[in-house]
Image (cartoon, helix red, strand yellow):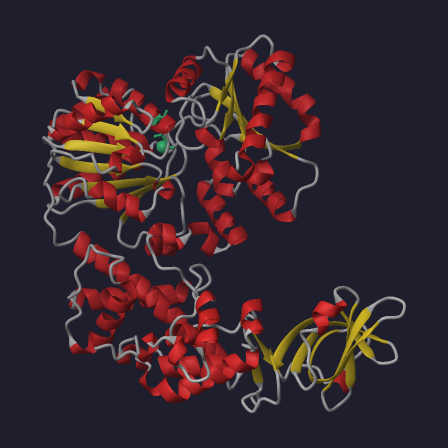
Amino acid sequence: MNQNPLNIAVEYLKGVGPRRAEVLNQAGVATLGDLLEYRPRRYLDRSTVRRIRDILPDEEVTVVGTVISKRVVRGGKRRLLVRIEDGSGVLEGVWFQQADAFARMFKENQLVAFSGKVVRYHTWQIAHPSFDILSEESDPLNTGQIIPVYPSGQELKKVGLSNFSLRRIIHTALQRYGRSVPETLPPYLVRNYRLLSRQEAYSQMHFPESMDQLSQVGRRFKFEELFYLQLLMALRKHFYVSPISGFTISSEDTTYRRLLDALPFRLTKAQLRVLEEIRRDLAGGHPMNRLVQGDVGSGKTVVALLAMFLAISGGYQAALMAPTEILAQQHFFNLSTLLAEEKLRLALLIGSMPEREKQHLQQQIAAGEIDLVVGTHALIQEAVDFDKLGIAVIDEQHRFGVMQRASLIRKGRHPHVLVLTATPIPRTLALTIYGDLDVSVIDELPPGRQQIQTYWRTDNSLNRVYPFIREQLAAGQQAYVVYPLVEASEKLDLKAATETYHYLQKQVFPNYRLALLHGRLKMAEKEAIMADFKRGSIHMLIATTVIEVGVDVPTATVMMIEHAERFGLSQLHQLRGRVGRGRAQSYCILITPPEINDVAKARMMVMTKTNDGFVIAEEDLRLRGSGEFFGTRQHGMPDLKYADLVTDQKIVQTARKDAFAIIAKDPHLRLPQHDVVRTHFKEAFAGKFDMMNIA
Ligand code: ADP
Ligand code: MG
């Protein structure tokens, strides 16, 4: 049945024996498709390669030439000399270290490229050039203007899979199978956008005619990648949201008013607007699938609370999932107080609870005896079953993956879903990352909030920082000191935090009560510490990043972050968001060693300059690049090999428009012009995205 030549195992290709096949497999190349996707690491453009004759002293150059001799000189300083010539002159590469090891890599008549700074001795020389071996013998394929250079794994080399052999295998395979490489984009799109066909794109990728053709290769594959990404979004949205009927929860205005009146504060305009959007979703007959974006401290929790309450008063259960136990406990505590009048049956379900207690809770949840359950990942475990889950809320969405979101949702029958995130991302990106969600934005902070003053200090000025913190404590405020905790050095970090804690308690703040909070503590201990801190009987919390998200103690006004250079921007912003929650002026003090690298410096500067989460997210994106920023996989999306969500936004938009148009017209991809799409989609994504059914 399988007609797609891309699935042919590499061992059946001409020029690949069992031994080579094994090595290729180890390098992740199992099929012809993988081989064609084995992208050159870079390209050498002969027109920019320097003729040896034209070299000037002290220039950085790349030259391409044939090896005419190699020898290891033993007298004096041991060194390897490799001479190449390019028809216009001779140049010598010199290795002073590992001369023998490098000597083994070169052979006479190889075509090689040397790059580096040239100096003039008896001949032109480059010391320790970076080099590529372009072919082992004269390479008839190597006539083009542009020479692809493949990733040269040591293993591949060992079995003789040089750049040259790879090229020959790929060349032969393309001649044999090239014409039957299936197109994956609908023909009309290829035509409209003048894209290279897939076959042509592979051919140009490995044997480019010009730099321009090469950029067309990039354009073609970027479009393809983004098109399928958006198709996935369109399908999710279509099958997962639109046609399914959900619970209709229409709330009486009187109930809603009563709730609003019972709150200890008045909601901001932005909060009210988002709540209206949510109410409309709940009453709309389809499952809500909404993301609420709002900067740290903008008051997302209370919005979620009201949404849950509306569902409960409509006779349903509600679930709220948070990424850490501390946060779950805090939500539980806050909801209990806010809802004290409403006689609700609330429960907290977290992993560290005794097994018996958990089981008992699970029974109650399944029997519908609990209205609202707050929890951690424990909520999505197998044993948890809801009687009538009407709404699932996921706090701090960026901490969870799409799969976890899906697991929670599956606990009910198409419940309404609300996800909250404090990671503000530019709109076009939101469309991609959360393409299957509707987005609401809380773009206003509750009144009376102060700008947090942020300072960057080095650790040798701590003796001026501590008195400042002491003044704050004396005025009845509280403080956090945060320590980074990276897994690799967890023990050491914890030790540092513990030592600081003892030092600060004994030497610096003997008249105040300090506590140490970290992830290794038992749940009851954490709970007790947080409760005391909230009550004000603990004045200062030395904590690892367990407090990063969500923790809310309005009387805390100082956030001091040790080793701030080790944190990312969004994490710093989250941490800073722990203060400035009350009426008093708050401070964030970033402590770093005197010498930190430029990127870390840039992060400190951004933090001291702005409090605006959107600005910070954009800077973060700029400093890190989009791949790392999101971890696409975490969002349940295929990895992007060609496209960049930031720099290729135009293509994102075009691809999105086309993908959504197709699904709107032909959601099951049954029309003949969508054949290629259906086939490719099934092949590339089968099994990974089970929520839609493409026949
Ligand atoms: P986040 O959006 O970061 O999750 P929270 O929901 O934790 O923010 O809210 C931050 C703090 O602001 C909480 O103490 C909350 O009670 C308070 N808050 C929320 N909305 C308002 C409001 N409209 N007016 C005053 N305080 C509010
Ligand atoms: Mg929150």
- Image coords of residue 45 (percent x, y): 60, 81
Ligand 2's quadrant = top left
Based on the displayed image, in which of its 4 quarters is residue 335 positioned?
Answer: top left
Image point 69% across, 27% down: which residue? 461
- Image coords of residue 325 (percent x, y): 36, 28
**Image position of 475 (left or right of 114):** left
Image quarter hosting the C terminus: bottom left
The answer to whether residue 248 is visible is yes
- Image coords of residue 534 (percent x, y): 41, 16
Image point 30% across, 62% down: which residue? 230
Question: Vertical placement of 9 versus 550: above or below?
Answer: below
In the foreground, 58 or 613: 58
The answer to whether residue 277 is visible is no
**Image position of 113 (left or right of 284):** right
Image point 25% across, 37% down: which residue? 381
Question: Vertical placement of 251 versus 619: above or below?
Answer: above
- Image coords of residue 372 (percent x, y): 20, 27
Based on the displayed image, in which of its 4 quarters is residue 254 positioned?
Answer: top left
Based on the displayed image, in which of its 4 quarters is residue 658 positioned?
Answer: bottom left
